[in-house]
Amino acid sequence: MKVNIEEIEVKEDKTIKELMDELQLSTAPILLELSGRIFYPDAIKDRRLKRGDKVTLIPLITGG
């Protein structure tokens, strides 16, 4: 199974929630890596990103 980890460079100031909505990932099972730390998007949805910040999207494998 291949898991695609994607790094996004923020083009304009926005919140994590705005970025997730823009990428249509609001309900996707993913983690975010920012500044070497891993977060669930909902835990930091109001965090402000600046132009040029890099966010890594890490998909979670779900199911059972």
Image (tube, rainbow, N blue to C red):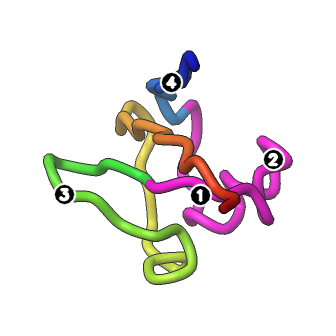
Closer to us: mark 4 or mark 2?
4
Q: Identify the mark nearer the N-term, 2 or 3.
A: 2
The 10 Å Cα crowd at callout 4, few under 14, some 14 to 19, many 20 or more, is few
Amino acid at circle 4? Glu
Q: Between residues 11 and 8, which one lies in front from this camera angle?
A: 8
Q: Identify the mark nearer the N-term, 1 or 3.
A: 1
Q: Which residue is mark 2?
A: 22
Q: Which residue is mark 1?
A: 14
Q: Position of residue 49 (x, y in %)?
A: 44, 55
Seen at 53% across and 24% down, the residue is 3
Q: Position of residue 1 (x, y in %)?
A: 57, 19
In this rendering, position of residue 21 left or right of residue 4: right
The residues tagged by marks 4 and 3 sit, at their Cα atoms, a distance apart of 15 Å
Q: Which residue is mark 4?
A: 6
In this rendering, position of residue 6 left or right of residue 34: right
Q: Are marks 2 and 3 in contact (CB under 8 Å)?
A: no
Q: Which residue is mark 3?
A: 37
Amino acid at circle 2? Glu
Q: Are marks 1 and 3 in contact (CB under 8 Å)?
A: no
Q: Are marks 1 and 2 in contact (CB under 8 Å)?
A: yes
Report the magenta residues as a range: 11-31
Quadrant location of the C terminus in the rendered image: bottom right
Q: Identify the mark nearer the N-term, 1 or 2.
A: 1
The residues tagged by marks 1 and 3 sit, at their Cα atoms, a distance apart of 19 Å
The residues tagged by marks 1 and 2 sit, at their Cα atoms, a distance apart of 10 Å
Amino acid at circle 3? Arg
The residues tagged by marks 2 and 3 sit, at their Cα atoms, a distance apart of 22 Å
Amino acid at circle 1? Lys
